Image (cartoon, rainbow, N blue to C red):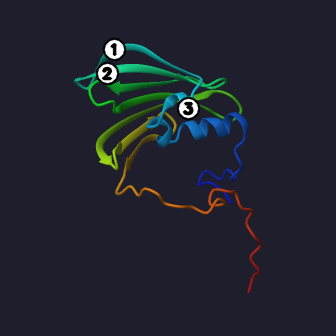
């Protein structure tokens, strides 16, 4: 199995796995103290005409994540992170969140735009959010492809 780039799929471990888990949107909208070693308010400011608090999230051995939080609603509006790349180096990535809606008492962004120099701009539009879905524990386990016999 290969990515569109031609690179083979591989199992993430260690630092790469921690980084991938921390980049999941559910982490950003949960209790940061559960996932990060340090959570610090850096300053107050403004983002797109809204009053914000800028927060620095730190996890040992990974580049910090900087988030801008709406001072009135608590919504995460903007995120800056550097994604550590295999072989060293990092890729600065910016994500902007919008179109927040209430889902069973939790505010969820239905639109977010991610951009970086390598991939350009990617727009995510959420159509629906299901709560309480049960998944097979092996759904995200990397499976080795099985040989397909020719006919």
- The residue drawn where x is 70% and y is 53% is 8
Up-down: is 32 above or below 44? below
**Image location (x, y in percent) of residue 117:** 48, 33
In the drawing, does residue 26 fall left or right of residue 100? right
- The residue drawn where x is 75% and y is 70% is 146
What numbered label is drawn on residue 7? none
Of labels 2 and 3, earlier in sequence is 3
The quarter of the picture where residue 63 lies is: top right
- Secondary structure of the residue carrying numbered label 3: helix
Pointers 2 and 3 in contact (C-beta within 8 Å)? no
Marks 2, 3: nearer the viewer = 3
Of labels 2 and 1, earlier in sequence is 1
Q: Nearer the viewer, residue 84 or 97?
A: 97
How far apart in space, not on screen, are marks 3 and 1 (Cα)?
Answer: 23 Å
Q: Label 2 belongs to which residue?
A: 52
- The residue drawn where x is 56% and y is 36% is 22
Crowding at mark 1 (Cα within 10 Å: few <14, some 14-19, many 20+): some
- Secondary structure of the residue carrying numbered label 2: strand
**Image location (x, y in percent) of residue 112:** 37, 42
Up-down: is 31 above or below 102? above
Q: Nearer the viewer, residue 98 or 113?
A: 98
Q: Label 1 belongs to which residue?
A: 44
What numbered label is drawn on residue 34? 3
Up-down: is 116 above or below 142? above
Pointers 3 and 1 in contact (C-beta within 8 Å)? no
In the drawing, does residue 2 fall left or right of residue 94? right
Pointers 2 and 1 in contact (C-beta within 8 Å)? yes
In the drawing, does residue 135 fall left or right of residue 40? right
The quarter of the picture where residue 147 lies is: bottom right
- The residue drawn where x is 63% and y is 56% is 140
Up-down: is 3 above or below 75? below
* Quarter of the picture holding the C terminus: bottom right
């Amino acid at each position: 199995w290969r990515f569109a780039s031609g690179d083979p799929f591989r199992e993430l471990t260690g630092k790469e796995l921690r980084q991938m888990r921390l980049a999941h949107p559910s982490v950003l909208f949960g209790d940061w103290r559960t996932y990060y070693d340090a959570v610090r308010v850096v300053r107050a400011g403004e983002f797109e005409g809204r009053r914000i608090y800028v927060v620095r999230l730190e996890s040992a051995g990974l580049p910090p994540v900087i988030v801008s939080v709406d001072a009135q609603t608590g919504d995460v509006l903007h995120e800056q992170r550097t994604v550590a790349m295999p072989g060293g180096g990092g890729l600065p990535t910016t994500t902007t969140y919008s179109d927040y809606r209430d889902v069973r008492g939790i505010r969820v962004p239905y639109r977010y735009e991610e951009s970086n120099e390598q991939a350009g701009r990617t727009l995510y539009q959420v159509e629906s959010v299901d709560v309480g879905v049960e998944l097979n524990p092996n759904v995200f386990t990397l499976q080795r492809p099985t040989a397909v016999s020719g006919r």
